[in-house]
Image (cartoon, grey):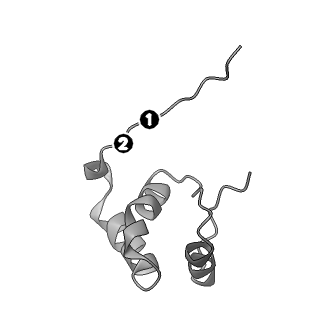
Amino acid sequence: MRDSLRITIINDELITILTWKQAMQLVHDIDVKDVLNVALTIELEGKLWTNDKKLKDGLKSKGFNDFFEP
């Protein structure tokens, strides 16, 4: 039997302006290409799953610690 995989598509227009600003403030000097992932994590109160050490270290240095650790 196969494990099921559930994917949910979220419209980025549902992310509030305040959350976009917060995410940009966090990533602007790390990697702005990650702003959507960080914004979505904040908006959904989720955990960010990334292997990007630079992003993780940079976010941790700013007090962001909502990471998924398998």
What residue do we see at 57% from left, 28% from top?
Answer: 5
What residue do we see at 57% from left, 82% from top?
Answer: 62
What residue do we see at 53% from left, 29% from top?
Answer: 6
- Quadrant, the N terminus: top right
Labels 1 & 2 near each other (Cβ < 8 A): yes
Along the horizontal axis of the image, is 3 left or right of 25? right
Residue 63 at x, y percent in the picture: 61, 78
In the current view of this chain or complex, which residue is farthest to the top? 1
- Report the front residue among 66 and 4: 4
- Amino acid of disc 1: Thr
**Which disc, if any, is residue 42?**
none
Give me the C-alpha separation between circle 1 and circle 2. Answer: 6 Å
- Report the front residue among 64 and 57: 57
Residue 9 at x, y percent in the picture: 38, 38
Residue 58 at x, y percent in the picture: 57, 81
Q: Secondary structure at mark 2?
A: loop
Number of marks in picture: 2
Along the horizontal axis of the image, is 53 left or right of 70? left
Dot 1 surroundings within 10 Å: few (below 14), some, or many (20 or more)?
Answer: few
Residue 25 at x, y percent in the picture: 40, 80
Q: Secondary structure at mark 1?
A: loop
What residue do we see at 56% from left, 52% from top?
Answer: 46
Query: Which quadrant would residue 35 be assigned to in this image?
Result: bottom left
Relative height, residue 52 to residue 1 (above, below): below
**Which disc, if any, is residue 10?**
2
In the current view of this chain or complex, which residue is farthest to the left? 13
Along the horizontal axis of the image, is 18 left or right of 40? left
Query: Which quadrant would residue 39 be assigned to in this image?
Result: bottom left
- Amino acid of disc 2: Ile
Along the horizontal axis of the image, is 10 left or right of 68? left
Query: Which quadrant would residue 60 be assigned to in this image?
Result: bottom right
Name the residue tied to disc 1. Answer: 8
